[in-house]
Amino acid sequence: MAPTPPIAPIPVSAARNHAGTVELNAVRKCYDDFVAVDNISFSIQPGKIYGLLGPNGAGKTSTLRMIIGIIVPDSGQITVFGEPLTRQHKDRFGYLPEERGLYKKMKVLEHVLFLAQLKGLSAAEALKRAHTWFERFELSAWTGKKVEELSKGMQQKVQFISAILHEPELIVMDEPFSGLDPASTVLLKDVLLELAKSGKTILFSTHGMDQAEKLCHSICLINHGRAVLEGDLNQIKASYGNCNVQIKYDGDARFLHESRLVESFNDYGNYVEVRLAPGADTQELLKLASAGARLSKFEVMEPSLEEIFIDAVGKPAVSQPAVSKPAVRKPEMSQPNA
Amino acid sequence: MRNLWLIVKREYLERVRTRSFLILTLLLPAIMTVVMILPAKLATMGEKAQHLVVVTSTPQFGEMVRQRFLAASAATDLDDEATPETSSPKQPPEPEYTIDVDANPTEAERAVLRDKVTSQQIDGFLWLSDDAIASGKVTWTSRRTPFFSDRSRLSETLNRIIQFERLSKNGITSDQADALLKPIKIEAVRMERGREAKGSGGGKFLEVVVMVMLLYMAVLFYGISVMRSVLEEKNSRILEVLLSSASSTQLMTGKLLGVGAVGLTQILVWVVMAVAFALPAMAMQPSFAELQIPLGVLVAFAVFFLLGYLLYSTMYAAVGAITTTEQEGQQLQFLIIVPLVLSVFMLAPVVRNPDSPAMVWMSMVPFFAPVVMYARIVVQTPPLWQIALSLLLLIATIAGLLVMCARIYRIGILIYGKRPNLPEILKWLKYAKA
């Protein structure tokens, strides 16, 4: 296993038993001088939902394209279903690209049938399945229309149906939720959960952390082409620790200055958010706080994926409530005139 | 194979079903018909028979001039080299002239005729008095200067009449005079595989030009169509979806064959229409019999047309693969058009001298072969090995281009935004082996 330096202190190789539906081993891809994917390794277990997370341009799409064999890695190995990736595996994939990838002038039903037949389905079988899915996604009235007459969201649904109609064992999706309204998002999420339950392996990329947090069993966070965090989502969260505490108090606030326990805090007046020092015990803080002040709330917060990501990437973000007020944080060099 | 078939089918059906295909298929023959017929119609429409007066010293001579003149005007195309013996059985055309004879060569009559010309009662008069003939100078008076063709015909006819007249004055009978003045005609005979083949260079040239025109049209219409559809696939991300199911070679081959079939369908419709309309009319013309095309030439036509079409469409696909927008693609188009145009320029030398070393080698160059080798076959069947070599090179080039194109297509597609330069393309070719 090649070392991946910036990986956070989590049990990276917990699930690395080479039984995965997809295995990436030290995969690297450059475009000229630009390193799009740098030494990424991960493993996706059968029947799991795996999230590939990261900001725009992190290398998510390149990674997905390598997994479905559109592009070839410069170095490293990719195995799917336990074998090195070849063209023979193509019919066992379903792929949903980031932007709509449909012929605009083609009729919806014909398009879905065309793509399904390319995946080896017979026309009759494809037709039968397509109608079930069109109904489910409320597209039945649109099957005779040209793709370009559909809204973006509807095109996205057509694209999704095309990706799963041949019932692939591995479904690879690039930003599947982009452009969907809330109702469709819920529908898609339900379908994905069903598919996973029926044993399909699902891999999708997103830059929105909430979807991933709700759906994924495991994730890989990438930034600038490198894996920043990888593994089981619950384990990641656990290893990140419950380091934030929200306290509502009335009285003596001296406990906030106990540097042994409190790394930084953010006082909102009504309540205070405390970031614990490494190794600090929440119970000790509770005792200390209750000694001097009257507490109406003491809640240990689970870190959100977004916080974890921002922390791992080392880049403070504006939308981060608990740890981002520079006034109480440790001085940060990379932040001029905040 | 199944994928290839699916792709060909889709490309074909999606195009044939469009309204623009239907319109183009029906409209182009209509436009061509109009373009070919209209100018001729327009030229003759306002033209009524010209009213001429011939002024001679004796009515007999005047009458003879009139006869000769009308006969000459009926046989306008007498000297057309392409159809040497066909002028006589032609149907008599509508009379171009009405000719009156005036046997009153006086100055007063000349003044009257001038007035008549001015007042448009007659279109012109010819002063052919004995004095004028003796002096060798004859005047033709009309409102407009005659066209060059009118004038040379006039003078030729007049010369013959006067030569005839002079001979008969010297005691030579009219039959003898005819025999003396009989013009000589040249008949072209080609040796074709040891047999004499009649038929003229003009007809051969026509066979080649028809092929070139069809090739040119097909390449222009459908080459651009190939390029456009490659660009469409690049610009929407349909290609990613397709590549996750099929190989880029399948996609490229399928596209070329599908679009190619559309072009062939259209040309077939046009040929059927043309034959249906033109055959009855052409069959009436005896010259049509001479245009019979040997089976070998027809086969050569089909083979070289198809391969040429495939070659040039592949080049269009390559242009589509390395560009990102249609404008860019159209700028690069000249790279494709240039060899096609060059091969058209080679037509004249090929037809004149099909065995010259230059033409032999040009017919081996794949980009010129469809036109040049075909032209050589039409004019004079070249040695079999030359045809075989030319075909082999052509097919190899198409296959090579196709593979190259599929690679560029596959890689170029995934790099958005800028046109690759040559070193980059070469690099892609090297590492896009999968």
Image (cartoon, coloured by chain):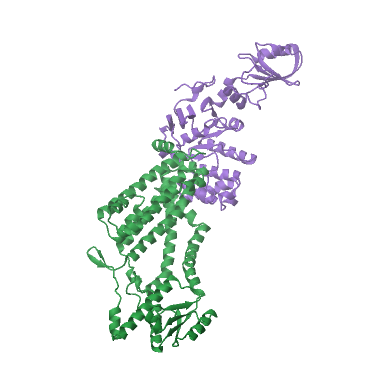
Chain colours: A purple, B green
Residue B187 lies, in percent from the top left, at 28, 70
Please tell me which residue lies in front, A181 or B358. B358
The structure residue drawn at horizontal position 23% and vertical position 66%, both measured from the top left corner, is: B195
Query: Residue at coordinates 38% horizontally, 43% vertically from top-left?
Result: B403
Quadrant of the rendering where the N terminus of chain A is positioned: top left
Say whether residue B199 is left or right of residue A111. Answer: left
**In the rendered image of this protein, does residue B391 appear above or below residue A301?**
below
Q: In the image, residue A263 lies at what x, y percent? A: 65, 15
In the figure, A191 relative to B34: above or below?
A: above
How far across and how far down the image is residue B327, in percent?
A: 51, 47
Who is closer to the viewer here, B179 or A86?
A: B179
> Is residue B71 in sight in this rendering?
no
Q: Residue furthest right?
A: A251
Location of residue B414 with respect to B104 vertically, above or below: above
Q: Nearer the viewer, residue A173 or B411?
A: B411
Where is residue B351 drawn, in percent x and y?
A: 32, 59
Residue A284 visible, this angle: yes
Q: How many marks?
A: 0
Q: Nearer the viewer, residue B273 or A278?
A: B273
Image quadrant holding the C terminus of chain A, namely top right
